Image (cartoon, helix red, strand yellow):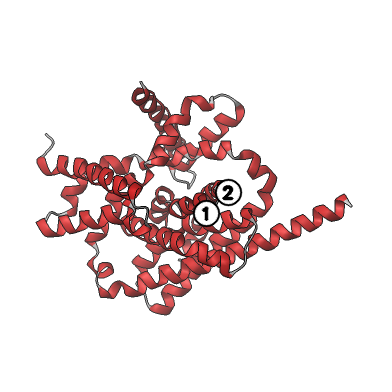
Amino acid sequence: MKVLRIAAQVLLIHAFFLMGEGFVHLSGLPIPGNLAGLGFLFAGLCLGWIKISWVEEGARWLLAELLLFFIPSAVGIVQYPQVMSIHGLPVWLTIAVGTVFVMACTGLLADRLNRLNQQNREVTES
Amino acid sequence: MIGWTTAAGLLGTIALYAVCKWVYRRKPIIWLSPVVVTPIILIVWLKGWGIPYAQYHQGAKWLTDLLQPATVAFAVPMYRYLPILKKHGRVIVTSVGVGSFVAIISTLILSAVVGINRLITLSLIPRSVTTPIAMETAKIEGGVPSLTAAFVIATGVIGYVSAPFLIRLLRIRNPIAKGVMIGTAAHGIGTSKAFELDEQVGTVSSLSLIVAGLVTVAMVQMGKGWF
């Protein structure tokens, strides 16, 4: 009964979302409820209150089908013809240039930091 | 009572997605990926039949609602990858943090340079992070979640296509650095490319995409007044 197990686990994960929503509502903290829920589930796993086997299959299914869940929102772009027509060109250009730029900066920085780390390790070990 | 078009919106989206996924498995080219093809076909369908988006979304919103538990589900890979995060934590968190900051600032600057209006600029800001978090972030700063969803896909596809080329051009050999750059800039879609490169790159990329999501929400929350 794999389907039922996945469904039950998704419900359990959803309970953590509701918990997150409730927490945000009560505390007035400026974070989305789903991230608070993520924090609770993560804490629960780390503290051993929640066994990974209780949520693993459900989580895997949710993340594997993540693309399906945001397709309806992406279709919502039909409501903004200014982005879909030729006038939207600067927007798509910004996305392309920006993405490549961010990747290059992040990659180069991580590469340098890694090298520094390794050098440090060698110095302390020698 | 659930109307005809409502049911068609929900079932049609799922069926179309299943077909696209099947095609993509046989021909794995990014332009044939379900993330790209499914929304395009649906847009053409809505436009062709003159169906208003609100009517379509009445049914399809059931799928959108699943984004909430999906975000919570990221806790599971985070817990699984905890040893990697502990071992390379400083490098990952620092690079992802700086990368996410660069993403926000470069979007603001580029948008100003090419003259993009405010509403669209606000929707562009969170486009580097995974959709469920990006859409929540868009709500926080006053962007349009629907636009953000489409921009997130475009960002992911560009990251997916350009990552191998950039890695060669910049001569990045370290698998941690490769994973960090892909996960920070191109979220889940880019991460699927990272897993094609190598298991470790994919794992670090998954971890980075979660960290980037958390960091971006925090930054947008702090900088809200300045946008």
Q: Residues within 10 Å of mark 1 (few under 14, many from 20)?
A: many
Dot 2: element: helix
Quarter of the figure with residue B32: bottom left
Type of amino acid under label 1: Gly
B47 sits left or right of B94 in the view: left
Front residue (pair B95, B113): B95
Identify the chain of the residue marked 2, using the numbered disc in the image.
Answer: B
Q: Earlier in the sequence, mark 1 or mark 2?
A: 1
Q: Label 2 near label 1: C-beta < 8 Å?
A: yes
Decide if residue B48 is on the left or right side of residue A114. left
* For residue B201, above or below residue A109: above
Q: Position of residue B8 (x, y in %)?
A: 15, 43
**Tally of numbered discs:** 2
Q: Nearer the viewer, residue A54 or A79?
A: A54
Residue B43 visible in the displayed image: yes
Residue depicted at 54% across the width and 49% down the height: B202
Q: Which mark is residue B170?
A: none
Residue B125 left/right relative to B87: left
- Choose between A25 and B179: the one closer to the eye: B179
Residue that mark 1 sits on: B183
Q: Position of residue A2 (x, y in %)?
A: 37, 24
Residue at image position (66%, 48%) is B89
Q: Which residue is mark 2?
A: B204
Residue in the foreground of this view, choosing between A96 and B114:
A96
| Quadrant in the picture for residue A68 | top left
Q: Gap in Å between the C-alphas at discs 1 and 2?
A: 8 Å
Q: Position of residue B69 (x, y in %)?
A: 40, 37
Residue visible at 58% across and 49% down? Answer: B204
